[in-house]
Image: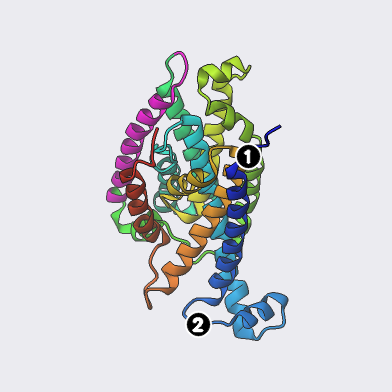
Amino acid sequence: MKITHDPRRKRRLISFVLIGLLLVFVFFYGLTTGSVKLSYSEVWHAITGSGDALANQLVWNLRLPRLLIAFLVGAALAISGCLLQGVMRNPLADPGVIGVSAGGGLVAIILTIVFPSLTGFVPLGAFLGAFGTALLIYLVAWDKGVSPLRVILSGVAINAFITAMTSGVMVLYSNRVQSVISWMTGTLSGKSWYHLEMIFPYMMIGFVLSIFAIRSSNVLMLGDDAAKLLGYSVEKHRFFIIILAAFLSGVAVSVAGLIGFVGLVVPHIFRLIIGNDYKFLLPISAIGGAVLVGFADTAARSWFGSIELPVGILLAMIGAPFFLILLQRGRVTS
């Protein structure tokens, strides 16, 4: 009997090992790099509690919480984009493109500059905004069922409407807009253990629920007719995945602002390498998103001298050309 070997199995193993090593590298690179350079031994001593006062302050109070938040935000955005691309069977299905992130951002901005006394409710508000936007997109796209194309088109239109509303709020409260400008471009500046504790429970809920979306995503990738033949309730599973993606995107937006291209680009990279099986694609995309945002945030705060560039700007500068290259080479297909 002839034994066939799956060439993707080796690529999956190599990819997981390499992305794991990259995560470790970014972790220590983020802790050593900044306006004050630290050696790896100084970072290690600070982590173990035997470092000097300066190293302890830099590592524990400034760099470590910010880096962990970057990892969580990157993983959440990558998972969100990966799930949406699968359930919509469309490479442009990203929380930033179809308006889910914009919905969360609108509510967060309203709470921040219109009702500043309610800023403590920004995480909850951002999730509710993202959730409400996802629900609105779903209802607008409904016509005896929901097709992936209708969801994408509805999302693009609603995204434009929400963006206009956001601009209107900022014009009406122009005297307070300075506090949200950096947040609009996506930033992790000033994030602390407080912000990590604020989003950590929500992130863990989203990550656990995403495990239950793996099988549904694989089935829905086959198409609605094939999924129904397998006994799946297509609309129920699609609704669950869309709401889960909105939940993860809303939590990420609440702490990091409007960061784009992570959910769009990262799943594409690994889909080209290891294929479409969500059992492997989803976890490796999560790690890849964490690596990308963690590295980009470290670069944004340390590569430009005394200027700290918002991480969202740097990610757009990286993500947009990369996506155009994929499109030019025909690697992005519906």
How far from the left and from the top, in percent, is residue 183?
A: 41, 57
Q: CA distance from mark 1 to mark 2?
A: 41 Å
Q: Nearer the viewer, mark 1 or mark 2?
A: 1
Give the label on residue 51, or none. none
**Residue matched to label 2:** 36
How far from the left and from the top, in percent, is residue 282?
A: 58, 43
- Look at the image and say whether residue 145 sits in the magenta stretch: yes
Pointer 1: residues within 10 angstroms few (<14), some, or many (20+)?
some
Q: Is residue 18 above or below residue 51?
A: above
Residue situated in front as seen by the camera: 107 or 332: 332
Q: Is residue 118 visible?
A: no
Pointer 2: residues within 10 angstroms few (<14), some, or many (20+)?
few
Q: Residue at x 38, y 61 (%)?
A: 314
Q: Earlier in the sequence, mark 1 or mark 2?
A: 2
Question: With 300 as the anchor, is 203 left or right in this view?
Answer: right
Give the label on residue 279, or none. 1
